[in-house]
Amino acid sequence: MSAEQQQIAELIAIGNDGRMYATEPDKLRRLVHFSLAREPRLTQPELRQAGVGLIAVGDYAHAQRVLADAVERASTPHQQVAAFVNLGDAHRYAGDLAAAEPLYQRAIATARAECPGTLHFALQHYGKHLIDARKPRLAVDVLNEVLEMRRLIGDPSLIASTRQALNAARAAVGQRTI
């Protein structure tokens, strides 16, 4: 990860609602726009990170354009999965759940077929999408699957983020949270 990507990542946090937000919105906005000024020379991961920064500052339309470019520039299945997920998030955060759904589905299909190590990531974001789409029962099923995957990975922060999303889905269907 480049120093610029690291700076962008450090200015993004995940709220209690599971959504990304900017810890210092003005600073993040300036950094992302500085990065995008070099757009033709950015690597695909740098372009994708700038798009994620745009989501965090709430500039969803611009994020959608940048992340669509990141999808086009993806040269590996891992890059494709990540870009499809982030583009799905840009649509979901903007409230366009119909546009987000097929993007998450493409990320999941690519992960299953070509990059299984990213499947938990794609399914996690799809599970959050299902909560927003008012399909909490399906979200519970998907997020339970993700929780099992992440337990096998053994990363406590991944497990915690899945539990948080799973609790939101369970609460939406009146189930006990964990």
Image (cartoon, grey):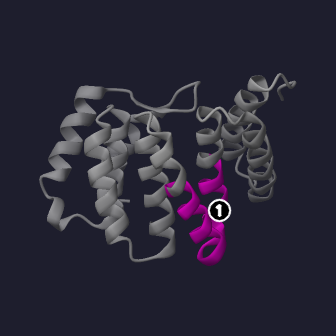
- Left/right of residue 132 with respect to residue 89 in the rendered view: right
Per the rendered image, the range of residues in magenta is 103-124
Q: Is 46 situated above or below 115?
A: above
Asked if the magenta segment contains residue 120, the reply would be yes
Which residue sits at x=58%, y=59%?
105
Picture mark count = 1
The image quarter in which residue 72 lies: bottom left
Residue 166 appears left or right of 20:
right
105 is within the stretch colored magenta: yes
Q: Which residue is mark 1?
A: 119
Quadrant in which the C terminus is drawn = top right
Which residue sits furthest right? Answer: 176
Q: Position of residue 27 (x, y in %)?
A: 24, 31
The amino acid marked with disc number 1 is Leu
Main secondary-structure element of the magenta-colored stretch: helix
In this rendering, the answer to whether 78 lies above or below 139 is below
